[in-house]
Amino acid sequence: QLQLQESGPGLVKPSETLSLTCAVSGGSIGSSSYYWGWIRQPPGKGLEWIGSIYYSGSTYYNPSLKSRVTISVDTSKNHFSLKLSSVTAADTAVYYCARHGSLGSPFDPWGQGTLVTVSS
Amino acid sequence: QSALTQPASVSGSPGQSITISCTGTSSDVGGYNYVSWYQQHPGKAPKLMIYDVTKRPSGVSNRFSGSKSGNTASLTISGLQAEDEADYYCTSYTSSTTVVFGGGTKLTVL
C-alpha cells in the first residue's frame, strides 16, 4: 500500500526558503507514470494546489506561486521535494503531498500533512 | 487562477439529502470531466470521495454521488449521517494545465 510522509522544518523565518520532502513508501516514484503533488491549507482556510511533478521531471505550478516554487524529484531516494522562496506569514499552512495519475486525476493517497509556520 | 465557487456552508438533518455545488467556467469544470470531491474532517488529511465527476472509489459509500451540468458540478449525499459532518472540497483540471480547488463547504448535520 502506497504511503506518503512529509518532513521538514516546522518553523521558517520570513524571507527565507521553505523546504519540505515527501518520502514515498510501498512503491517506486521512478518506475511508474504518476504525478506527485503538493497542496497546502492555511489554518482555518481552504486547500490550495501548489504544483505537481511528473515522474520524469516535468513540472506544473500554480500561477500565483510559480515565481517562488520549485518541485523536484529524487528517484534514488524515492522522494520528491518542495522549495518555496521568500516566505511570509501568508505561507503558514499545513503542507500535504499526494499522488495523482495525471493533472486531471484525483489526489490519492495523501500524506498526513505537516504544519509550517513562518515567523521570526 | 480563480478558485471554484462553493457555498460556505450547508446543513441537513439525519436521513435527509443535501447537495453541494461547485461552479467554475468552461475552462475548468465545464470543459473537462475531471472534477473530484474530497471530504476533510478536522485535523485530518482530505479523503477522496468522487472523481471524474461521477465515479466513486472503492470503499466510499454509495450515499455519495456526483454530477455535472454545464460549468457546475455537484456532490449529493443521501441518507445523511452524523459522520458526514465535515468540510468538502471540489477540484478541477483547467485548460492552463493546472489544478484548481473550490473554497470548501462546511456540512453540518443537525
Image: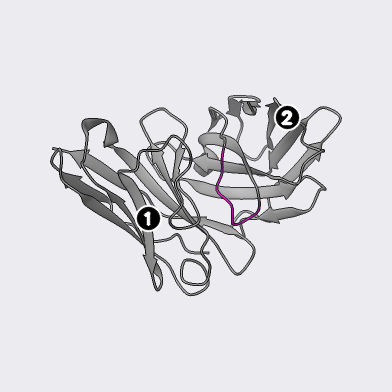
Chain designation of label 1: B
Q: CA distance from mark 1 to mark 2?
A: 30 Å
Relative placement, left or right, of A15 versus A30 is left
Identify the residue at the far right of this view: A76
Q: Residues within 10 Å of mark 1 (few under 14, many from 20)?
A: many
**Is A105 inside the magenta-drawn segment?**
yes
- Whether residue A119 appears in this view of the structure is no
- Whether residue A74 appears in this view of the structure is yes
Relative placement, left or right, of B32 versus A15 is left
Q: Residues within 10 Å of mark 2 (few under 14, many from 20)?
A: few
Q: Position of residue A111 (x, y in %)?
A: 57, 30
Instruction: Report which residue position mark 2 lands on.
Output: A27
Q: Residue at x 21, y 40 (%)?
A: B80
Q: Nearer the viewer, residue B78 or A3?
A: B78
Circle 1/circle 2 CB separation < 8 Å = no
Q: Position of residue A60 (x, y in %)?
A: 69, 55
**Rendered view: B99 above or below A99:** below
Quadrant of the rendering where the N terminus of chain A is positioned:
top right
Q: Residue at x 53, y 67 (%)?
A: B32
Asked which quadrant contains residue B96, the reply is bottom right
Q: Residue at x 64, y 24 (%)?
A: A9
Instruction: Report which residue position mark 1 lands on.
Output: B66
**Rendered view: B74 above or below A114:** below
Q: Amino acid at mark 1?
A: Gly
